Image: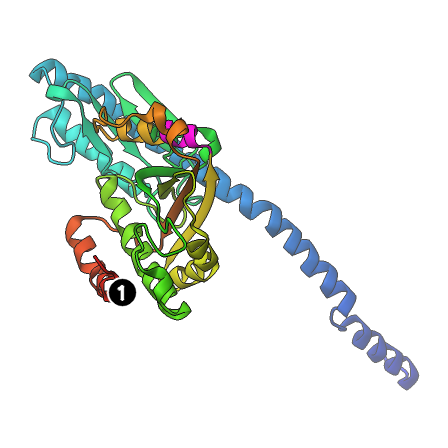
Amino acid sequence: MVLIKEKDKNKHMIKMKRNKRGFTLGEMVVTVAIIGTITAVSVPNYMRVKMQVNMEMVKQHLKTIGTHMNDVYNRNKQFPQDINRLGSSGEEVAITASLFGINRREYTTDGYTTGPNLSTFQFRTCPQAGRWGIAGDRCFTLTPLGITEDSGNGAAAFGVGASWGNSIPVYIISGINASASGGGLLKNLADLTNAEQIEYAAAWLEITALQLNGKSDYKIQNTLDGPALSFIDFKQPGQNSKLFDALLPSLIETLKAKGIYLTVKERPVADAGTTYSAVQKALGRNIGFVNVSSYASYYSQAREFSFQLAQPVKNKAEYRARIASASQTFFKYYIL
């Protein structure tokens, strides 16, 4: 039996207590900092890799669709009328399966259009609403010639140049508030109080913002993380819109409270005309009666009013339901 002196026993107990001490504040701070650094570096890289894999899978599905679309054409001498309503042949089942795969990757499957006599087609797919930068950051367009991709705002596909960014002009007007006396589209604006002017003009802008989805045949959804739809206001020399312009800051804030985000930009008149023409052509509209080349000599100013909506309008029925309140407000002040 080994006897331990009381003095040695106390030393041993003190040493054990020292060995059981916890982390110091400095050690914890350093540890947290290291974990934070690792997380900051690894998480974005992981998300980027995941997004790249997701987009690559979408492209693979598009390649499969393209192959079988050509098979369908070779058999029927035309492409399908509606890619989302196909038959039960082997090729059509394979296309449907690939569409399901694209949808599983959180990409859209409703961007299918056809050419004259079903002799050609275009299928455009982008990240679903709210999934931009998560499911992917590119849009893909499949045609009989192959697959192309773009930066995702959809503007390039509608003839919009780089200087216009992600804004797509689908409508033109002339003179919102063309004179100090309140002429133009917003008549008798000068006869109202400031609060009434804001309510009146905001109602008109809300109606117009909702109309823009229809002006694109509901092909473009101007979500908060997608493209912006816009109209161009052309102004003739001598027209004065100072009254309306003074209201713009208040109008922007009023619309924002409704989930409608407005941006106003000056555009070169000639460029605005040709860009609008290109968009109409991409939408399949004939605007031969519009003399775009004369815009620069006829108008002195072009301003683009672009809108992004928290909840874009998806069809005509939804549009009619949503403009009811704004229309009541507008016609409370509008005088024919």
296 and 207: which one is in front? Answer: 296
Residue ID at (38%, 70%) = 193
User: Can you tell which quarter of the image residue 215 is in?
Assistant: top left
> Could you tell whether 151 is left or right of 324 in the image?
right
47 and 295: which one is in front? Answer: 295
Region of the chain picked out in magenta, as a range: 268-274
> Could you tell whether 64 is left or right of 273 in the image?
left
Residue ID at (25%, 29%) = 123
336 and 216: which one is in front? Answer: 336
Amino acid carrying mark 1 in the image: Tyr
User: Label 1: how many residues lie within 10 Å, few (<14), some (14-19) or many (20+)?
Assistant: some
User: Can you tell which quarter of the image residue 109 is in?
Assistant: top left
Q: Is residue 111 above or below residue 278?
A: below
Q: Is residue 19 above or below residue 82?
A: below
Q: Name the residue under label 1.
A: 333
* Quarter of the figure with the N terminus: bottom right
Q: Is the magenta stretch mostly helix, strand or loop?
A: helix
In the rendered image, the residue lying farthest to the bottom is 6
- Membership of 300 in magenta stretch: no
Task: Give residue 52's position: percent from left, percent from top.
Answer: 45, 35
85 and 234: which one is in front? Answer: 234
Does residue 319 appear in the picture of this structure?
yes
* Quarter of the figure with the C terminus: bottom left
Task: Give residue 260's position: percent from left, percent from top.
Answer: 37, 56
